[in-house]
Image (spheres, rainbow, N blue to C red):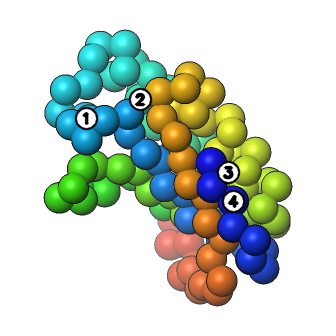
Amino acid sequence: MTDVAAPAGPYFLYRLIPPRATFPADITADEAALMARHADYWAAALARGTVVVFGPVADPAGVWGLGVLEAPDLGAAQALVAADPAITSGLMTAGLYPMLGGKARPAPAG
């Protein structure tokens, strides 16, 4: 995981780095099950309000995962990342970057 010494804001960019450039096109059954646990983990964090958005990015160089985390400090954001099943399994690595500023729209009503 990459740590950047920067002022801690409430938002952090989480970049999930897949094990190979061809992932997820050649995902195995075991990896698919792990990625389902990964998605469930972040969906629960989204429901708790500690994640603003998460999902895969269709980068032409290879798909990678993105999350924008809302946490009081870098340590709290690191703890969220460290508990991700994709990380705890050792399948993927991650970068975590404090945002130097940012604004988020209010949650939609309903």
Q: Position of residue 47 (x, y in %)?
A: 60, 50
Count residues near mark 1 (Cα–Cα under 10 Å), then give few for <14, some for 14-19, many for 20+. some
Residue wearing tag 2: 35
Of 10 and 98, which appears nearest the observer? 98
Are dots 2 and 4 in contact, CB under 8 Å? Answer: no
Residue wearing tag 3: 48
Question: Which SS class for mark 3?
Answer: helix
Are dots 4 and 1 in contact, CB under 8 Å? Answer: no
Residue wearing tag 1: 24
Q: Which residue type does callout 3 highlight?
A: Arg
* Mark 4–mark 3 distance (CA, rounded to whole Å): 24 Å
User: In terms of image quadrants, where is residue 36?
Assistant: top left
Are dots 2 and 1 in contact, CB under 8 Å? Answer: yes
Seen in the picture, residue 20 relative to 65 is either above or below; the reply is: above
* Mark 4–mark 1 distance (CA, rounded to whole Å): 26 Å
Q: Earlier in the sequence, mark 4 or mark 1?
A: 4
Q: Which residue type does callout 2 highlight?
A: Met
Of 14 and 105, which appears nearest the observer? 14
Residue wearing tag 4: 3
Q: Earlier in the sequence, mark 2 or mark 3?
A: 2
Q: Earlier in the sequence, mark 4 or mark 3?
A: 4
Seen in the picture, residue 53 relative to 104 is either above or below; the reply is: above
Question: Which SS class for mark 2?
Answer: helix
Q: Can you tell which of label 4 and label 3 is closer to the viewer?
A: 4
